[in-house]
Amino acid sequence: MSNSIAISNQAGIEYIISINEELREEVMFLSDDFPISMFTQVFKHEASDYIPLHWHNELQLTWVFEGELEYYINGDRVNISSDKIIIVNRDQMHSSKTINNNARTLCINFGLDFFHPLVLQKYISPLIANKGFSYHLLTLNPYQVRPLEKFLDWKKESIGYFSVINFLSQTFEGILDGYSNKHQNDEELKTFHDMISYIHENYSEPITVDDISSHALINKNRCTYIFRRYTKMSPIKYLNTYRLYIAKNMIIYSDKPISEICFDVGYKQISYFIEKFRSSFGFSPLKYRNKFGGLEN
């Protein structure tokens, strides 16, 4: 089961993104001939919709054409609305959630095969390989909005790949013109990814900070520092936040009793679970199920 209830739509087909045990998103391309996936997503703020931490082999361009989203990308927090687009490099851990209202996005995931080999070799590949390039935020020019609006209405059988390739090429030209290096610590990011994976695989167990830090072969202080840098939370705060999001989806997408869900996600006291759930989502688990469980997303 996916950890997100934000609904995606590609070529008229609704789905929830699929993330495997390694937190890698399984990307569905529009065609076997071109490495491009283009889809919209709908976030309902009242339901606390979000996209959990994940990564993918492809780069991703995102335009939040309605509302506003908060992105976490390798520890950075970025707010994005309709006047900007963001390019996320491949293999970068990122997540997104609503801020105050509902939001809708256009996402384009893409490989690099459609770039001319010389352009790819001389310009694109060095940028992608640069360890300082995890993402880039660009302000939209007026002429860029119209093609993005056209992308919203495309269907699988009528995709104009020249338009997509042209738009992505212009976007990379803008990145290269204004790009400044950002330095990252590869080993630290690897440690962070390992700890996140450990939590996602063992959240139903009574995990402690000692368990998380021992798994990563670091001390507790270092563990806490890394979590605060990349998630703005302590390790236990992240663990409990993740448990509650898993519980939220189980409440919506299953008919399990609330008490059973409580224990499934690692809570030992139903009253404490209800208190934390209400604090996070504004409703008790039962009221949340009654309000959102029977609705079409």
Image (cartoon, rainbow, N blue to C red):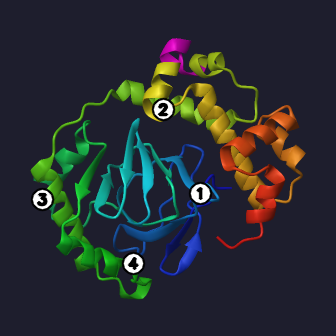
Query: Of marks 3 and 4, which one's residue comes earlier in the chain?
Result: 3
Alpha carbon distance from label 4 to label 1? 21 Å
Q: Which residue is mark 2?
A: 232
Residue at the image position 32 percent from the left and 49 percent from the top = 89
Q: Is residue 257 left or right of residue 136?
A: right
Q: Is residue 280 left or right of residue 6?
A: right
Label 3 vs label 4, nearer the camera: 4
Label 3 vs label 1, nearer the camera: 1
CB under 8 Å between callouts 4 and 1? no
The crowd level at tag 3 (other Cα within 10 Å; few <14, some 14-19, many 20+) is few
Q: Which residue is mark 1?
A: 49
Residue at the image position 57 percent from the left and 18 percent from the top = 213
Query: Of marks 3 and 1, which one's residue comes earlier in the chain?
Result: 1
Query: Does dot 1 land on a helix, a strand or a loop?
Result: loop
Name the quadrant of the C terminus. Answer: bottom right
The crowd level at tag 2 (other Cα within 10 Å; few <14, some 14-19, many 20+) is some
Q: Which residue is mark 4?
A: 152
Q: Position of residue 109 (x, y in %)?
A: 38, 62
Whether residue 191 is visible to the viewer of this picture, yes or no, is no
Query: Of marks 4 and 1, which one's residue comes earlier in the chain?
Result: 1
